[in-house]
Image (spheres, grey):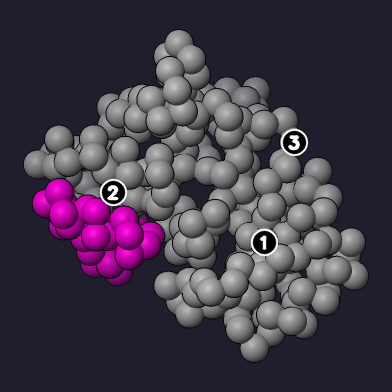
Amino acid sequence: MNQDDKKRAAAERAISLLPKDAFIGVGTGSTVNYFIDALAKIKNDIRGAVATSPDSKERLLKVGIPVVSPTDAGRLPVYVDGADQINHVLQMIKGGGGALLSEKLIANWSEQFICIADDSKFVSRFTHPLPVEVIPFARSIVAQTLVKMGAQPQWRMNFKTEHSHEILDVSGLNLDEPIRMENTLNDIIGVMENGLFAKRPADVLVLANDRDTEIITLTSVQS
C-alpha cells in the first residue's frame, strides 16, 4: 500500500471502534479527511460531530453530518485524529495543520482518544518540528526564550490559527521527556499551547502498514 492507501485503511478501521448514537470528536488533517469520508457511510448511526477546525467542519457538513459545539455535545465518548508523529507509548506531536489548541481541548474533553496513522508516523524518538501556538504580541519574546533553551524556532509566516494566534515551528528541543517539556513550554508567558500530546496520549492507535492495520492500546504498551 502507498501512504494514501494506508491512511484510508487506518481511517476505515477506526469506524468499527465508534459507539452508536453518540457525538464524535473529529480532528484535522489528511488522514482525518479519509475518516470523514468513511464516517459519511454510517452517518445515521451517530448523532453528530464536534470539529476541531473550520476545514473539518466544512467537510463534515458537506457529507451531511451535523456539527455541534463542545457545550452542546457534552462530554464526548471518543475523539478521532491523526498525528504528525506518535511514539511507542502513544504520545504524539500534533499541530502541523495549525489546529493544536482545539485538538488538545477536545482530546481532553473525550473519554477515549483514537489516533489513526500510517506507519511512517510511528517513531521511537520525536524528530518532527514542534508547533508552539503563541499570541502575536508575544511571538518575538517567546522565540527568543526558545533560542535560549537551545531551540530553533521558525515563524509560520502568513498563517493565523482559528483563534487568531500564530505558530512557531520549533526544532532542536530535547523531547526525550515529553511530559516535562510540554509543561515547560506551556509555562512560557505568551504561549497558548504546544503540540506535544504527552500528558494526554492516545488511548488507541490504529496503525496501517504495508500489509494490514493493527490496533495498539495504551494499556497494552504500559503493561
Q: CA distance from mark 2 to mark 1?
A: 29 Å
Measuring from the top left, give residue 219's x and y in whole percent. 56, 28
Residue 186 as seen in the image, left or right of residue 119: right
Q: Mark 2 is on which residue type?
A: Ile
Q: Residue at x 38, y 25 (%)?
A: 5
Q: Nearer the viewer, residue 181 or 147?
A: 147
Measuring from the top left, give residue 148's x and y in whole percent. 90, 70
Residue 73 as seen in the image, left or right of residue 135: left
Give yes or no for residue 53 being in the magenta stretch: yes
Label for residue 125?
3
Task: Report the magenta residues as a range.
Answer: 50-75
Q: Mark 1 is on which residue type?
A: Asp
Give the quarter of the image for residue 171. bottom right
Give the quarter of the image for residue 8. top left
| Above or below: residue 162 compared with residue 178 | below
Q: Nearer the viewer, residue 2 or 43?
A: 2
Instruction: Say which residue label 2 marks.
Output: 24
Measuring from the top left, give residue 25's x and y in whole percent. 34, 51
| Callout 3: SS | loop
